[in-house]
Amino acid sequence: RLGETHVADYPTTKGNYEFARLVEERTGGRIKIEVYHSSQLGQEKAVIEGVQFGAIDFTRVSISPLSAFAPAFDALQMPYLYRGEEHMWKVLNGSIGEEFLASLEPANFVGLAWYDSGARNFYNSKKEIKSVADLKGMKIRVQESQLMMGLVSALGAVPTPMPFGEVYSALQTGVIDGAENNWPSYFSTSHYEVAKYFTLDGHTRVPEILIASKISMDKLSKEDQEIIKQAAKDSMPYQIKLWKEFEKVSEEKVRAAGSIITELTPEAVVEFQNAMQPMYDALSPELQEVVKKIRDVQ
């Protein structure tokens, strides 16, 4: 069984189905993985715990909640860490990515593969954001994570944690001024209707990860474990391609609906990056070392 929070036709869910198809095909039907989309097996945190104890075999999650089990994952989510998308994939597909997948074993997980979830950007109902100063005092919804709260505070805005489902009405009633997310979430939640200013600052690229229960994997032969690991890796290009298409459609739809899209000047990007320095300084020496390794990847 594989637990997934997204709906059936979402790119990550389709990636899960491709993974399951490859495993079934390559084991001659001996191993069948059933994908439970739309949080049928529970919310993300509960599913992760289920995988840890072997009650659920696989799940696809954002790396954010995993940092509770393997703190080094915080380094992968630091703001403005990557020079761009290509840099991120070089890191994840290289030795650093492999070390991260392996680092989950002590917590009883087997890291299998990385999926794309794009870059997150700020959007709001008030005005175009062209500089850090424009964000000052704005109430911005964030996920319930220290990292995201720290990021928004560092930019002079006021972080407002709340569940994702409440954001639309909070934007509509002015409880918050803005939020941050990727193109598809901005579109699919209809947030563009109530917050038409979208700034392409790409502050974080937080990849998704496919993980297995070490308890479930240990019951299988070495050969079958290898088949599963390879099938997970081989489902990546398919998911990444679907994500790209999904992003493009979302962007076209919100532009057509009249959203105002702001690209930052190179100078403004540097200003946003510099505002993050205190967050980097606050990292442990171990995490600072990881960050340095990531930045050194060419």
Image (cartoon, rainbow, N blue to C red):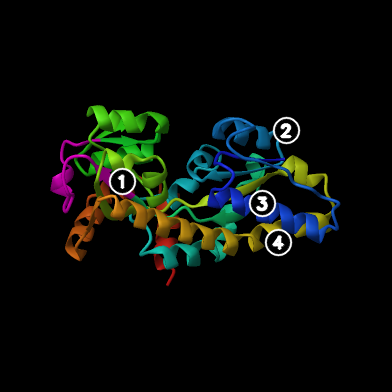
Q: Residues within 10 Å of mark 1 (few under 14, many from 20)?
A: some
Q: Do the residues bearing badges 2 and 1 touch, measured as CB atoms within 8 Å?
A: no
Q: Which residue is mark 1?
A: 279
Q: Which residue is mark 4?
A: 230
Q: Secondary structure at mark 2?
A: loop
Contact (Cβ within 8 Å) of mark 1 with mark 3: no
Nearest to the eye among marks 3 and 2: give it: 3
Badge 2 crowding class, 10 Å Cα cut-off, few under 14, some 14 to 19, many 20 or more, is: some
Count of picture labels: 4
What's the mark number on residue 55? 2
Q: Earlier in the sequence, mark 1 or mark 3?
A: 3
273 versus 134 height, above or below: below
Checking the image for residue 17, the label placed there is: 3
| Magenta stretch, residue numbers | 121-139
Single out the residue that lies furthest toward the front: 256
Q: Provide the secondary structure element on which disc 1 rests.
A: helix
Q: Disc 3 residue type?
A: Tyr
Location of residue 47 by image quarter: top right
Q: Disc 2 to disc 1, how far (Cα)?
A: 37 Å
Q: Is residue 134 magenta?
A: yes
Q: Is residue 252 above or below residue 173?
A: below
